[in-house]
């Protein structure tokens, strides 16, 4: 990945006018450094046996050589930190829900800070959804690995099996909740987005629209 552009000029829906402050996962203890070349070689070796490791190599490359990131900001929606850092995750995601349900995800992340590691996410979903599905998900956060971790509120939509013959294509907008403001309203700060391709059990619905409350934990392997 050499270049990445995010155009938010048309994003004008304000979650809360008071503007929130990103919530972080708190301080993390650095782990012992590992030779990047050794991890890259191991992933290259495993790629023919598990093609999904190709995504891990892609996020590792971000931690080795930072891509050019361009952001066209929204005129109204507050974003995360002003840092030029960029963090990307790729992994396996699975959801089981009938109006309400659970989502689990895990995989690798890479950051321009530079950092490379593994992550895990658990979430509670509610909305217009019925069935179980699993697949691959890419997550893009415009911030550091600390911004990538912690609690999130995401607004998700997907187009389902009746259109794509067994596969669903979905996307999510990711927000970080801040401390409750006046009237108990929780301000949200835009952090990034996610896209996924999943397959699963037949659903009576050709689409899903959900809100998810989740928390992500990370373990850095290289810093």
Image: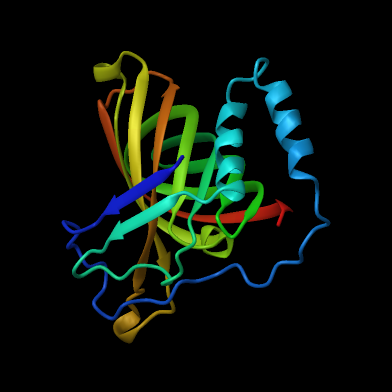
> Measuring 49% from the left and 61% from the top, which residue is drawn there?
85
- Which color scheme does this rendered protein use? rainbow
The residue sitting at the bottom extreme is 182
Q: Position of residue 212 (x, y in %)?
A: 41, 51
Q: Residue at x 70, y 53 (%)?
A: 219
Q: Total marks drawn?
A: 0
Residue situated in front as seen by the camera: 35 or 49 = 35
- Decide: is 43 above or below 155: above
Q: Is residue 180 above or below residue 155?
A: below
The residue lying furthest to the right in this view is: 32
In the rendering, at what x and y percent does residue 24 appear? 55, 69
Write the residue at 44% across / 42% down. Answer: 2
Instruction: Specify the quadrant that holds the C terminus.
Output: bottom right
Residue at image point 47% right, 36% down: 137
Front residue (pair 139, 213) = 139
Q: Foreground residue, 75 or 181? A: 75
Query: In the image, 158: left or right of 143?
Result: left
Which x, y percent locates residue 44? 68, 25
Q: Nearer the viewer, residue 94 or 53?
A: 53
For this view, does 29 lie left or right of residue 100? right
**Horizontal arrangement in the rendering, residue 12 relative to residue 126 (left or right):** left
Picture quadrant where residue 75 is located: bottom left
Q: Pinpoint residue 31: horizontal percent, then vertical percent.
A: 80, 58
């Amino acid at each position: 990945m050499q270049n990445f552009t995010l155009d938010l000029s048309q994003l004008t829906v304000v979650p809360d006018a008071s503007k929130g402050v990103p919530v972080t996962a708190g301080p993390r203890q650095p782990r012992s450094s590992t030779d990047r070349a050794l991890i890259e070689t191991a992933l290259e070796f495993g790629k023919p046996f598990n093609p999904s490791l190709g995504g891990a190599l892609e996020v590792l490359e971000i931690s080795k050589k930072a891509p050019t990131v361009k952001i066209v900001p929204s005129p109204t929606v507050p974003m995360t930190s002003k840092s030029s850092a960029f963090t990307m995750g790729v992994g396996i995601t699975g959801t089981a829900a009938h109006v309400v349900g659970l989502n689990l995800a895990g995989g690798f992340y890479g950051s321009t800070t530079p950092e490379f590691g593994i992550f895990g996410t658990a979430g509670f979903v509610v909305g217009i959804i019925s069935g179980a599905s699993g697949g691959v998900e890419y997550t893009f956060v415009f911030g550091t690995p600390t911004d990538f971790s912690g609690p999130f509120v995401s607004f998700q939509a997907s187009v389902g099996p009746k259109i794509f013959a067994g596969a669903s294509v979905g996307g999510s907008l990711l927000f970080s909740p801040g401390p409750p403001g006046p009237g108990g309203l929780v301000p949200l700060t835009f952090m990034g987005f996610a896209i996924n391709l999943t397959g699963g059990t037949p659903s009576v619905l050709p689409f899903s629209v959900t809100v998810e409350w989740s928390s992500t934990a990370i373990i850095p392997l290289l810093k």
